[in-house]
Image (cartoon, rainbow, N blue to C red):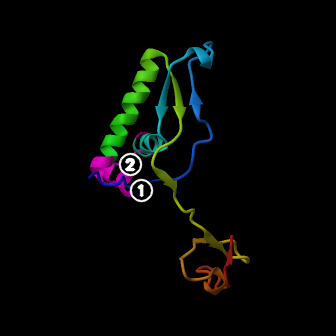
Amino acid sequence: MVRPRKIRIVQNEPEVNYFKPRRIPLSDLEKVILKIEELEAIKLKDLNGLNQEACAKKMKISRGTFQRILNSAKKKISDALINGKAIQIKGGNYRIAQKSEYCVCPICGYKEYHIRGIPCSKTKCKKCGSFMRRK
C-alpha cells in the first residue's frame, strides 16, 4: 500500500503560468508541465538563496522530498530551455500558506506581526504604548 503524499506548502500561486520561445506559436510547441511546488522549490533555493533544510521547512516536507522536487523542476526547466519547449505551470499537491497578519499602531505607525489568539486591540505598541489595530 502506497503512503499518501504530504501536501506541500507554497507562498502563493504564480501570476504567470506559461513561458515559451519567441516567434513560435504555442500550438506548435511541445509542453513541459512544471508543478506549482516545483516552481516554489526553485524560488526558495535558487532565487531566495535558502539552504535545502530551510526550504524544506518552509514547504513543510522532508529534506529528501525537497531534493527530489528540486531535481525534477531543474530537469523539466533544462529540457524546455535546451529543446525549445513551452513551460506550463500548473497542478501539483500543494496548498497556499496562511498569510501572516500584523497589527499597526494608529498613533506612531509601528508594525508588529499578529500573534494568533491575541487580538490586536489588546496588544500595546512597543514604541508609544497605545493599543494596536489590525491591518
* x and y percentages locating residue 54 in the rendered image: 36, 54
> Is the residue 35 above or below the residue 58 in the image?
above
Chief SS of the magenta region = helix
Determine contact: label 2, label 1, CB under 8 Å.
Answer: yes
* SS state under label 2: loop
* x and y percentages locating residue 127 in the rendered image: 61, 79
Q: What residue is rendered at 56% in x and 50% in y? A: 12
Q: Quadrant of the C terminus?
A: bottom right
Q: Nearer the viewer, residue 129 or 135?
A: 135
Task: Left or right? Give the position of 5 relative to 12.
Answer: left
Identified by mark 1, the residue type is Lys
Segment tinted magenta in the rendering: 46-65
Residue 40 lies in the magenta stretch: no
Which one is in front in this view, the residue at disc 2 or the one at disc 1? 1
Q: What residue is rendered at 31% in x and 41% in y? A: 68
Task: Left or right? Give the position of 5 relative to 89.
Answer: left
- Name the residue at the front extreme: 1
* x and y percentages locating residue 82 in the rendered image: 42, 17
Q: Quadrant of residue 16?
A: top right
Does the rendering let one see residue 112? yes
Identified by mark 2, the residue type is Leu
The residues bearing labels 2 and 1 have C-alpha atoms spaced at a distance of: 10 Å
Name the residue beneath numbered marker 1: 58
Q: Earlier in the sequence, mark 2 or mark 1?
A: 2
Q: What residue is rendered at 47% in x and 51% in y? A: 94
Name the residue beneath numbered marker 2: 50
* x and y percentages locating residue 115 in the rendered image: 53, 76
> Is the residue 17 above or below the residue 37 in the image?
above
